[in-house]
Image (tube, coloured by chain):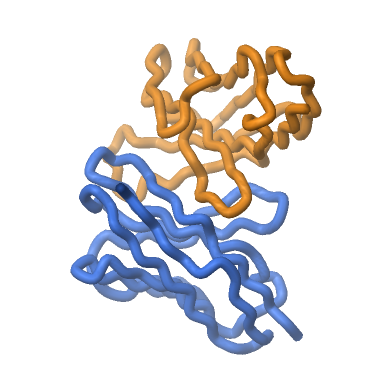
Amino acid sequence: IAGITQAPTSQILAAGRRMTLRCTQDMRHNAMYWYRQDLGLGLRLIHYSNTAGTTGKGEVPDGYSVSRANTDDFPLTLASAVPSQTSVYFCASSDTRTGYGANVLTFGAGSRLTVL
Amino acid sequence: GQNIDQPTEMTATEGAIVQINCTYQTSGFNGLFWYQQHAGEAPTFLSYNVLDGLEEKGRFSSFLSRSKGYSYLLLKELQMKDSASYLCAVRDSNYQLIWGAGTKLIIKP
């Protein structure tokens, strides 16, 4: 089934530990995104990538890093987790090569991260 | 700053009609989206408006007024499965999506 796979589904992590959230898509979309979703707030963009080999900072990039070595994979790394990074993280992708138009995002199922 | 406002929660009855409003103040406008998100799941695309007017798609319709910075999502013939959060998002002049906090819709029998 075409779509986005995220791992892990959930994780409890001690503060100060390093953590990588994995994201893989099989739709050959050029653009990929990482969002966090917190209660009472809208989805907030952490980092994005418009094409393999390039990345950009979103609204809340501090404490996070990403890489885009190929079209399919877009891992998100927390170098030293802090409790404020407790959230649900969604990876998403879209195809913007033919123009933005509707530019519909396809989301992964999410990764629930708790930092203690 | 950029802002998207939606009601936090709404309640409606199965079989009825409900209108979920969204007002926005953004740096430029390049389209407005509605997504549905069931509890514990990923958001899924519902509708896209870039011109003023009503877009109808089955039981769901979405309206846009750019001059008023206003949109609504209209859900007809409500079903229990429509219980979900509905997210409004606007694409700004930099083609970045600005998201509202979402409206939780509760459907009662």
Which image quadrant is residue B31 in?
bottom left
Direction from residue A7 to residue A89 in the image, left or right: left
Where residue B41 appears, x then y in whole percent? 68, 50
Which image quadrant is residue A36 in?
top right
Residue drawn at point x = 63 percent, y = 83 percent: B12
Q: Colour of chain B?
A: blue
Q: Is residue A96 visible?
A: yes
Where residue A25 appears, x then y in whole percent? 57, 29
Image quadrant where one finds the N terminus of chain A: top right
Where residue B3 appears, x then y in whole percent? 36, 54
Image quadrant where one finds the C terminus of chain A: top right
Count of numbered badges drawn on the protein: 0
Where residue B74 appears, x then y in whole percent? 47, 77
Residue drawn at point x = 26 percent, y = 71 percent: B65
Residue situated in front as seen by the camera: A14 or B50: A14
Residue drawn at point x = 34 percent, y = 36 percent: A96
Chain letter, orange: A
Direction from residue B21 to residue A37 in the image, left or right: right
Residue situated in front as seen by the camera: B72 or A28: B72
Residue situated in front as seen by the camera: A35 or B50: A35
Figure check: B107 above or below A22: below
